[in-house]
Image (cartoon, rainbow, N blue to C red):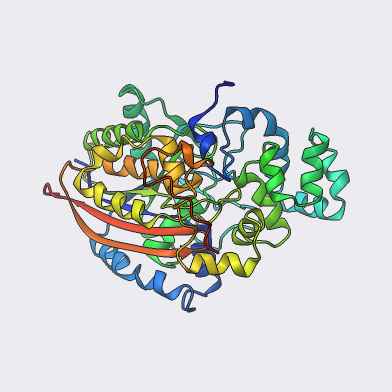
Amino acid sequence: MAKIVAGIACSHVPAIGIAMDRGTTGTPYWEPLFRGYTPARDWLAKLAPDVAIVVYNDHANAFSLEIVPTFLIGVADKFPIADEGFGPRPVPTVLGSPKLAWHLAESLILDEFDMTIANEMPVDHGLTVPLSVTCGQPAQWPFPVIPICVNVVQYPPPTGARCFKLGSAIRRAVEKFDQDVKVVIYGTGGMSHQLQGERAGLINRQFDTAFLDGLTKDPLALTRIAHTEYMREAGSEGIELVMWHVMRGALDDKVTEVYRHYHVPASNTAAGLLILENRSPA
Amino acid sequence: MNQPRDYDSIPGTYVYDAERGRVGYALNMFCMSLNKVENRRSFKENPSAYLDRFALNSEQRRTVLERDWLGMLKVGGNIYYTIKIAFCDGLTFQDVAGMMSGVSKDAYARMMLAGGRSPEGNRYKNAADAPGPTAASQEPDRG
């Protein structure tokens, strides 16, 4: 039986990827952020998952406003790296896991989550930065990836509660897969940040800390945060945090916080990283 | 659709909602075209001629040609799209964020290094709209 054993919440700030690609992670600006990533990389290498489900949002790269899928699953055997307007990141092509992905697509739709299915799709920093953060710079990514995209660019994104329920449905689907596969799930984006308008640069450490705490202790309470509250408290782009609920919904009710890292600033953003392990035996 | 939205009370924030999506489509699709290297080249060579390929209105066109980053948001631009013009110019997200918030690049960078813009005093356009006594205190922006 396949099983989700752990969840990783991780900001996907493009500048973090650029710092790695340009080799500037040791500068005084970046060093404190990257120092905090080392324990997460060690943990993940030791866990050695077979597959990662990465919940992220596309930023006007794979999709434009032409078609805006609210929830989408990538079922391809590979996902090329997107050109986001300054050339593709120099990172390995992301390999997919088509059998499990198709199984998830089928199961989720029959479980009343009406997923869009993508057979061809480039992936942008939303997916590749969390891989870089947690895997470093390998010649090939250490595991195949099933991308799940959530719209957070065209308002309104799905609610936090809906995202949590999607996570629960992903868990049910994974557990129905008849092969022994060890799965980790990433929820990406956030934490507090605002990239636009006169209020650009907003950071709310208090909100972020409460969110990190609540994800372990009382995730259902967090799913009741309304969209306007995210935007008011965590910045207009802080609403990306709804994607963390997908990850959390896919885990046990009781989880153990294994690791946390929080740093301000990564460009315009509060960068958060949280690792949660299921308490039930793998 | 035309009802006031509760997020309209957030200062300095342009939520890319249904109304902006309706108004801003052509502007954002022009930005999207800059994901292709050959289009970036054409736009740089002759911005005005390149813009003729898209159905921008005159104000949208002006904001692009003058790089009025804040103005773009007011006429339906979505930051994830308009930033592609900035990338074309060799600017970063932080460069544009500084310009939108009306401070120098250095001042903006200092504000971020000091922990970012505080939510205190930046939650509501009008302090009177804020619920409870604590949120009503209006401090000036840091940085």
Above/below status of A177 relative to A214:
above
Would residue A133 appear left or right of B13 to someone viewing this image? left
Q: Where is residue B51 in the image (x, y as percent from the top left)?
A: 82, 42
Q: Is residue B119 visible?
A: yes
Above/below status of A11 relative to A43:
above
Q: Residue at the spot x=74%, y=50% of the render?
A: B68
The front one of A103 and B133 is B133
Q: Can residue A50 be seen in this view?
A: no
Would residue B31 appear left or right of B139 to someone viewing this image? right
Q: Where is residue A201 in the image (x, y as percent from the top left)?
A: 53, 56
Q: Position of residue A224 (x, y in %)?
A: 31, 34
Above/below status of A124 relative to B109:
above
Above/below status of B62 relative to B5:
below
Residue B26: image quadrant is: top right
Q: Residue at the spot x=45%, y=47% of the render?
A: A238
Q: Residue furthest left?
A: A281
Q: Position of residue B52 (x, y in %)?
A: 85, 39
Quadrant where the N terminus of chain A sits is: top left
Q: Residue at the spot x=21%, y=56% of the render?
A: A257
The front one of B114 and A271 is B114
The front one of A92 and A239 is A239
